[in-house]
Image (tube, rainbow, N blue to C red):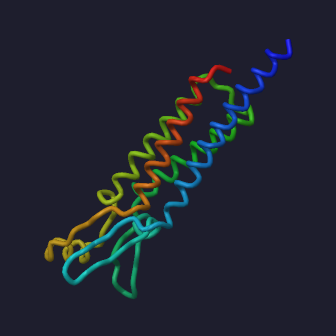
Amino acid sequence: MTKKSSKRTLKISANLILNCLAFVLAVVSIFMIFAPALNVKGTLINDTYSGVHTTFGFIDGDYVYLSFSFLNLLPYLLIIFALVLLVLKMANVIKAKYIDYIIIALLVVAGVLFFLNTVMTNFSQSYANTINNFSLKKSMLTGPIVAGVLTLVSALTLLLNKFIKK
């Protein structure tokens, strides 16, 4: 009888460890908003913007480079919502049957949206004209890539957690 209870404790702790790992990975992906996210490069211009700039905008003096982008804010909101659901699930407040799949779907959508950072960034009209006139290259940097990978790994961790028998 003691062997059965020790196995149960081991499986419950494995689920808890995977849930906590998914939580930590998702939280770290939120902090990637401070990492470099976008580079605009040409012969005379080499500008680097963080995730905060590509999400909330960037103004230097009187010149507006980037404006607010709700679509760049959306992955962070989805992750926060998924984290709230995950904490409520871990605290046994939510006992819905499909809550894990909802959390996984939120994390997967957020992870995919991170990879669309350069497409969803709102450039001001004058800065967009500068980019087009001088054939400047826009490239994604480490912030959204790491955030997207961490979010997708977090979703995979929760999916793996579904296959461990309780």
Picture layout, residue 76 above or below residue 101? below
Which quadrant of the figure contains the N terminus?
Answer: top right
Residue 17 in percent (x, y) is at 67, 38
Relative to residue 120, is residue 101 drawn left or right? right
Relative to residue 67, is residue 10 drawn left or right? right
Rendered residue at 50%/36% (across/down) = 156
Q: Observer-nearest residue: 37 or 71?
A: 37
Rendered residue at 42%/68% (across/down) = 36
Residue furthest front in the image: 3
Which quadrant of the figure contains the C terminus?
Answer: top right
Q: Observer-nearest residue: 89 or 17?
A: 17
Rendered residue at 45%/46% (across/down) = 110
Quarter location, residue 141: bottom left
Picture layout, residue 2 above or below residue 115? above
Residue furthest right in the image: 2
Picture layout, residue 101 above or below residue 50? above
Residue 165 in percent (x, y) is at 64, 20
Quarter location, residue 70: bottom left
Q: Observer-nearest residue: 163 or 79?
A: 163
Quarter location, residue 144: bottom left
User: How many tags in the picture?
Assistant: 0
Rendered residue at 28%/72% (across/down) = 40
Residue 55 in percent (x, y) is at 43, 64
Relative to residue 9, is residue 146 drawn left or right? left
Residue furthest bottom in the image: 61
Relative to residue 159, is residue 140 drawn left or right? left
Residue 48 in percent (x, y) is at 36, 74
